[in-house]
Image (cartoon, helix red, strand yellow):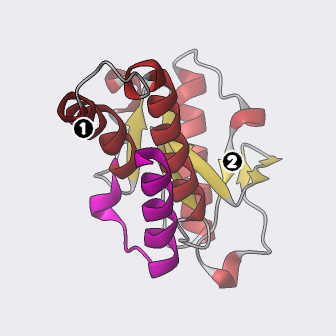
Amino acid sequence: MDVITERVMEQSPWTMLFAEDIVICDETREGLEGKLERWGEEWENRGQKVIRTNTENMCCNRQNQLKDINLLGEIVKRTEKFKYLVLYVEETAELQMEVNSRIQAGWNNWKRLSDVMCARSINLKLKGKLYKTVVRPAIIYGAETWSLKKIFEKEMDVAEMRMLR
């Protein structure tokens, strides 16, 4: 992947790679189309295939929202959100999906531990340690980078209190 992308790769955050996912950013629609053309040509020249049906476009600039983005002559599907690694990125820069995802991850971990957490024979101190090492980190993963609104903070607090009860 490094060899294929060395001629078109830019510094983060303009280009980010993870496994087979690529995020390409630019300040203008024309600049983005130019980068997409270079990336597409580079991939195809190296014998790789660009899967255009999996390629998505998200615009955070209200002026360019109605204009289409082209990749090698085809219009790129528009999206309002996408998942990069384990975090959701939304066009509106809201965190609702991410907060919901983190709360769900916490519940999933809690459910995996429910036999232990509900057992009367297990010490409360041990249950607290399990909660702090397995459930809570799943809820707050990535939260240090959020600009959290009070309503989202309250949603997370409510979920945590329900789990603790």
Q: Quadrant of residue 47?
A: top right
Relative to residue 143, is residue 136 depicted above or below?
above
For disc 1, the neighbor class at 10 Å (few under 14, some 14 to 19, many from 20) is: few
Give the residues drawn in magenta, as a range: 141-165
Mark before the other along the chain sequence, 1 or 2 = 2
Relative to residue 13, is residue 134 depicted above or below?
above
Label pair 1/2, CB-CB below 8 angstroms? no
Q: Could you say whether the residue bearing mark 2 is in a helix, strand or loop?
A: strand
Residue beneath the point at 33% across and 22% down: 3
Q: Quadrant of residue 117?
A: top left
**Along the line of sight, which residue is nearer the eye, 164 or 52?**
164
Residue beneath the point at 39% across and 56% down: 14
Residue 75: x %, y % from top left? 81, 51
Relative to residue 93, is residue 107 depicted above or below?
above
Tag 2: residue type? Glu
Q: Which mark is residue 128?
A: 1
Residue beneath the point at 49% across and 62% down: 158
